[in-house]
Image: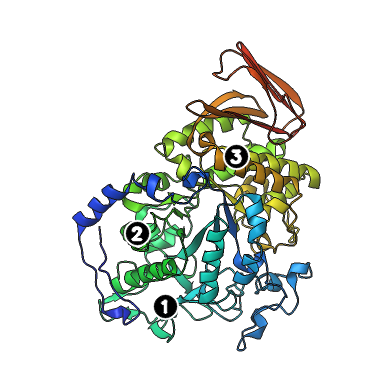
Amino acid sequence: MVALVAMNIKQSPKKFSFLVVLTAVLCAGALHGRREDKSQNAGAGKSGDYRSRTIYVALTNRFHPHDPYQPYVDPQYPNATNSVNCFTGNCDTEVEYRSFWGGDILGFIQKLDYLKDMGIGAVWLTPMYEGVRDYGTGIGYGTDYHGYWVINYDRVNPHFGTWDQVRQLGKALHEHGMRYIQDITLNDSNPNDVHVFGRLYYGVKTEKLLIDSYADDFDSSTGLHFYKHYDNDPRCIEEHKLPDGQQTDWQLHHCSLVDLSGYNQDDATIANYLIGAGKLWLTNGVDDFRLDSAKYPVPDFIASFTQEMIKKSRQLKRGVPYIVGEWSAGGAGGDPKSLAFANRYDTYHTNLLDFQLAIHLNQYIGGAVEDPSQQFSAQDLAAYLTKRVSAFDGRDDWQGTFIDNYDQMRSIVRLHKLGVGVEESKRRLDLATVLLMTVRGIPIILYGDEQYLGRDADNAVSIPKYINVSNDDPWNRVGMTSFSEDTRAFQIIKTLAKLRQDSAAVQRGKYNPLYADQDVLVFKRQLRSETVVVGVNRGLAKQIAVPGATGLAPGSYGNLLDPSEHSALQVTPTGFQIQLGQLGAVVVWLK
């Protein structure tokens, strides 16, 4: 285990070295591990629990350009920004989708009232560090509109804004009762075969060269390379052929992720540079972090990074930050290494984005239109939700849960490709949203899902067997075109975000299935005397009668999702009845 010496990296990042203090870090992990549940929750909802929050994730450049529309245009690379306003729906080419649209920090601030009305408690924004500036040639390249091709963590990408605007964003979010989650790339900088070929800088006011290129990356102060260079190793040649989730630990931590310049975190200069970047962004208003590609960096470095962020946050008189990491194929039933990582929270202080749950939620709402290999009934989902609790050692309620993410095909598009009609696709997505907001975990809403945003632009026929893991890049990163608060999806999120804020049972209560068949799942979330009952139905309308003791108080209860349904749930001493419409859902709060 490696502990890092405190330093001022802005002066000369090549002069610092690691201090190996195994005992110190392990003790710190033991001290901070379970206290996370209390300290990182400061200011979260009425209960003071981070699990009371609903997170909203936005691709910064595709959310909203500030009014009036005047996007940043790089004087050296003007073609990197589209010449038309794509937010009005005028863009339909791949080049336009891989260029900058004009969404920025000021535009995001202008829509905070919209997010507050939806009940959002935290905002996760894609990276806003200074990135590559030109439009790279070749298939799948384009610009750094997504923010993941970094050239300097110490500066803000002018396409998104300035340091003053970052601080303004943090202040505005706090004034709206929200926390600021910043995405950070700890695994890699930028492509090694295009743009700037792995070049990396440091410095806020005066920019200085740290790494010339992937090919010229020797660190004379440590005798190591800044980047990993194992692509010709037979193990890495094999790794590039393996399905996601089947790599060995060695392959994860040594082989390049596609053509990206992967950091050698064993090099002290790089490790200290990345930790310094995290501290810099915390100082300027960030509260929490999402760790991009968290399964690839050396695990000891993740432990050191998160520990240093905890220390810095406390120096700033804040609690422990909420940190969630991306582990594709991770979760119960997925890559077992993901659970081994997540269940060592006392060491790594990192929760996971639950990819396996997302797949199963999508399979459930797909129903009969799914490929036979993808069929997942309500009974399967009921059992999986039970399995998930033990798989995460009871910390499943801290993991980040989602339906959609901007790396994969949007659910609304996926359903369309499977042959489901427009309106029915919306109702099916609503079912997934109800489940997302009420199962154990911290729900994450992808920007636009509340507007049923999606674009089936490529018109390609996807193979149903693989449709739940298709990426659909770049069409899944469509820009927001509406901020209506009247869609059913918006209203569902608003209602259930409020429930999550107020209900300890939803935040941290137990999950108990009450009934399940092919299409219908009824379960309760319970904490002491408080219970929330949830029923979802992907099939035709039906009334479910379940005999036997349920532990529910006798009475007739209305549906939070539809005030006109006054008797959606009826409980007697000998059982209960629940009325579920076609593609319908019922949520009842028994206080």
On the question of residue 292 being in view, the answer is: no
* Position of residue 93 measured from the top left corner of the image (x, y, whole percent): 74, 70
**Which residue is depicted at the point 35% across and 58% down?**
310
Is residue 517 toward the left or the right of residue 129 in the image? right
The residue labelled by disc 1 is 214
* Position of residue 353 measured from the top left corner of the image (x, y, whole percent): 50, 50
Q: What residue type is labelled 2?
A: Arg
Front one among 486 and 378: 486
Quarter of the view holding residue 103: bottom right
Q: Is residue 425 above or below residue 141?
A: above
Question: What element does badge 2 sit on?
Answer: helix
Q: Which amino acid does label 3 sit on?
A: Leu
Is residue 86 toward the left or the right of residue 576 in the image? right
Is residue 567 toward the left or the right of residue 39 in the image? right
Mark 3: few/some/many CA within 10 Å (<14, 14-19, 20+):
many
Quadrant location of the N terminus in the rendered image: bottom left
**Which residue is depicted at the point 59% across and 78% down?**
136
Chosen colour scheme: rainbow
Which of discs 2 and 1 lies nearer the camera? The answer is: 2
- Mark 2 or mark 1: name the one nearer the start of the chain: 1
Q: What residue type is labelled 1?
A: Tyr
* Position of residue 202 measured from the top left corner of the image (x, y, whole percent): 40, 80
Quadrant location of the C terminus in the rendered image: top right
Q: In this view, does 191 lie above or below 482?
A: below
Front one among 142 and 161: 161
The residue labelled by disc 3 is 499
The residue labelled by disc 2 is 314
